[in-house]
Amino acid sequence: NGPFFPARAARCVEVLFAPHPVRAYRRALPAMGGKKEAKAEAAKKEETAKKAVISLDPPSGTRDFFPDEMRQQRWLFNKFREVAGLYGFQEYDAPVLEHVELYKRKAGEEITDQMYNFTDKEGAEVTLRPEMTPSLARMVLNLMRVETGEMAALLPLKWFSIPQCWRFETTQRGRKREHYQWNMDIVGVPGISAEVELLSAICTFFEKIGLSSKDVGLKVNSRKVLGAVTKKAGVPDNRFAETCVIIDKLDKIGAEAVQKELTEKVGLSIEVGKKLTDATTAKSLDEFAELAGVGESDEVKEMRRLFEMAEDYGFGDWLIFDASVVRGLAYYTGVVFEGFDRAGVLRAICGGGRYDRLLSLYGSPKEVPCVGFGFGDCVVAELLKEKNVVPVLPHTIDYLVAPYNQDMAGKALNVARRLRLAGKKVDVFPDPAKKVARAFNYADRVGAVRVAFVAPGEWEQGLVRIKDMRNFGQDAPDSVKQKDVPLDDLANVDRYFGVTIDGKPIDSSASSAAAPASGGLDSSAPEQAKAGSEESFLAVHPYLGGFQPSRADAELFEKLSKTGRPSTPNMARWFEHVGSFQPAQQKAWC
């Protein structure tokens, strides 16, 4: 009826009798008021297409390391290794996959709920390691004689590692679900000299990365002191670890919530719980001992001794006493510590302490004294940014080898191989061309210090033309920046420029001692060029003195400087090279 009939009725009839009813119906939708349905279907197709494309982001809480980031990481890890080496530690490692049972300590620790754990195809309960200390304990137990508890290895063990650790936790600045952690542990030293050594190592590391005690500090406390308090309050020894884990939540949940947990989970009275939380607010060791009511106990005396030793060692200004530091892992038994940002911007930078009873939990027949720390890479990276001391680490190589044309490509590869055998980092220009500018532009982009240009003219003379692009100023003449180096002497190329690849002046005596013999000559008794035979001698030696500049080089250069540059190729090359040295350097050869 009405206006609908003539047009829309005809369209409906067309749909009903169409040979392909579904397609005809979809074509009819716009005319029948079906625009919303068509739009919804298009959106659905778009969503399906999106789902079909793989995500380019790494899993939540994890990181990709592109080359720029990887250079930063390698730099940081090298600092870790450098400091560990300075303190006499040896590196070790263990599988990233560990036994779940190593971490089930039943003390209310967060770590047990944060594991990436699963049952493998053999039915074993395993996890990506959330921390390294249990793996260390397992490995140390492998060195122990089960019958006697004696160690098969020489004590103390001083080991370090940089493992990747995994925890399923809330991500935030300085905290990821995966991170690398520098661990240093000492096994077999019962006294606090071990703690002092580790605290010193941490301070040394901070200094190595450009930070001082004005930027970073170390909060120190002792669970032994806290243990004296809880024991006096009637807390059973087997509930002490759980008590510490609860007190460690003070900053997160507040004093009242901590007191409530101490009452409900450990069974302490409200008065005792309040006494414990009040004691953790102490600003000095004396105040803590007074509030806790432990007086000048042995535990307090040990802490005083630690601070005295730190002063004697020379890093006392880095340390402060902080009674609130108890650490969240159940296995700590003595001194505990945390690194902190004095500006208060970042979370705990590192942490550690003594854990003398951990090996006993895993089956050791006797207690083994252990102490160590963990230092995560994520928070250190944020700290470097915060303090504006992130190192600039551009990509660099020593040499770019560029063939003049395709015919010289094989020769260029031979040059590259010789330089690599000499320990140089080398890239080869991938597009041989007569346009030298293209090769030099590429060299600049890949950070090459020198360019070895392999061309027919020099090759026929047994030479390779090398240009230094970084170590000399733009105004320096080509005779200083560019040298024709004998192919057979590429291992000694630095001598022709008078500087190493990183711009350090060459020590003539040191370099000659390290120089390899050439042409069968005995480098322990270097030959000297005889008068009248300089040209032939310089064909296989960089100097008249053999492999080091000598009085003869200085005297002949001074003489020829008055008459002009020699015309023969080897003498000419020698003349230009010697001329690149300052007069004072030449006099030193005499």
Image (cartoon, grey):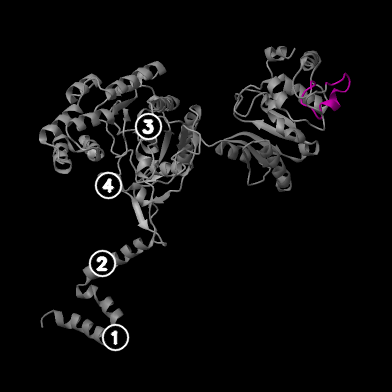
Circle number at residue 39 = 2
Q: Decide which of 413, 101 is in the foreground and name it.
A: 101
Residue shown at 16% from the left, 28% from the top: 278
Q: Residue furthest right?
A: 532
Within 10 angstroms of label 3, few (less than 14), some, or many (20 or more) residues? few
- Can residue 72 be spotted in the picture? no
Of all residues, the one furthest to the front in this rendering is 147
Determine whether 375 is above or below 505 in the image. Answer: below
Q: Nearer the viewer, mark 1 or mark 2?
A: 2
Magenta segment main secondary structure: loop
Give the residue at mark 3: 385
Is residue 397 rendered magenta in the image?
Answer: no
Q: In this view, does 223 lie above or below 61?
A: above
Q: Residues within 10 Å of mark 1 (few under 14, many from 20)?
A: few
Task: Give the spatial CA distance, label 1 vs label 2.
Answer: 23 Å
Residue 544 belongs to magenta span: yes
Other-residue count near label 4 (Cα within 10 Å), few / some / many at <14 / 14–19 / ≥20: few
Q: Of the residues under marks 1 and 2, which one precedes in the sequence?
A: 1
Query: Which amino acid lies under the numbered mark 2 shown in the image of this protein?
Result: Lys
- Horizontal arrangement in the rendering, residue 353 relative to residue 87 (left or right): left
Mark pair 3, 4: CA separation: 38 Å
Nearest to N terminus: mark 4 or mark 2: 2
Depth order, front residue of 343/269: 269
Mark 4 lies on residue: 106
Q: Is residue 260 left or right of residue 142?
A: left
The answer for how far apart the CA atoms under marks 4 and 1 are is: 72 Å
Q: What stretch is highlighted in magenta?
A: 528-545
